[in-house]
Amino acid sequence: MASSRPLPERAALGGRLIVSVQAPEGSPMRDPAVIAAMAEASLLQGAAGVRLESPEHIGAVRRRCPDALIVGLWKRTFPGSPVYITPGWEEIRAVWAAGADVVAIDATERPRPDGQELEALIVRASQELGAPLMADVDSVANGLRAATLGCQWVGTTLYGYTEATAAQPPPAWDLLGPLRRELPEAVALVCEGGIASKQEATRALACGADAVVVGTAITGVDLQVAAYVKAMAG
């Protein structure tokens, strides 16, 4: 079920919204049918695409929404490595085979499982699969490096979530301007992480993002309800 559709040009993103449709382990929402329904609802209301976690969920959405733009990833943890967003070749191949149009990968400098190297993975994804990649990064330097290595999209997903940026809460306002100025013209810049309002999404576009990913603020039922309950309990 690997995607045969061409990746949209940067201009086609046109300042649009991508909805991250995910649910935590143990949640009743983490059901392929529920995920697919939320994805379809998002697309029907004008989202440019959806960001999905796991081959199972990607496949469910692809079957229900055959024309959807899907950014796919697979969160897996391994001993000795902090990298968990599509960390290796097995995960890249599975996400692509499930029907993703773009495969999101951790593109930080942190060590990957089994000594796998980012550059080799990008080359292999391109040569063996023809899979476009979204580089999830935490810094300007890592974003530019990922683009140089061949990633078609760069996202600020991991800003605030790596050891080097743990003291810097997202959104990654400081990254957007420098990245847009220095990235190649054809590489799309995606703001992801910490966007919690329409005003912040609009600000991200003004700062240089081509598209904005919003997850918890739209589809994070578990976290949103827990936050309300906690606040109201005083």
Image (cartoon, rainbow, N blue to C red):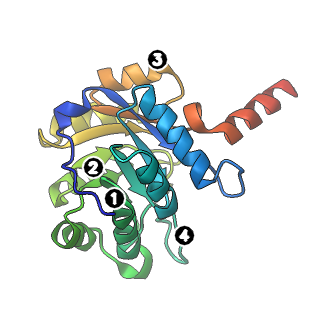
Relative to the observer, which residue lies in front, 177 or 105?
Answer: 105
Q: Check if mark 1's residue and mark 3's residue have beta carbons within 8 Å.
A: no
Q: What is the distance, in whole Å, between disc 1 and disc 4 at their CAs?
A: 15 Å
Query: Is residue 26 placed above or below 80 in the rendered structure?
Result: above
Where does the image place residue 28, in percent across and percent down from the top left?
Answer: 72, 50
Q: Which residue is mark 1?
A: 107
Q: What is the distance, in whole Å, between disc 4 and disc 3 at their CAs?
A: 34 Å
205 left or right of 113 in image = left
Q: Check if mark 4's residue and mark 2's residue have beta carbons within 8 Å.
A: no
Instruction: Identify the mark nearer the N-term, 1 or 4.
Output: 4
In what element is the residue under mark 3? helix
Q: Amino acid at mark 4?
A: Thr
Mark 3, Cα crowd under 10 Å, few <14 / some 14-19 / many 20+, is few
Q: What is the distance, in whole Å, between disc 1 and disc 3 at their CAs?
A: 28 Å
Q: Which residue is mark 4?
A: 77
Question: Which residue is drawn at the image coordinates 37% and 26% (left, top)?
Answer: 204
Relative to the observer, which residue lies in front, 81 or 43?
Answer: 43
Q: Which residue is mark 2?
A: 143
Q: Check if mark 1's residue and mark 2's residue have beta carbons within 8 Å.
A: yes
Question: Which residue is drawn at the image coordinates 11% and 38% (left, top)?
Answer: 185
Q: Check if mark 4's residue and mark 3's residue have beta carbons within 8 Å.
A: no
Where does the image place residue 8, in percent across and percent down from the top left?
Answer: 21, 41
Question: Which residue is drawn at the image coordinates 54% and 70% (left, top)?
Answer: 77
- Let me know if residue 41 appears in the view: yes
Q: Which mark is residue 199?
A: 3
Q: Amino acid at mark 3?
A: Gln
In what element is the residue under mark 1? loop
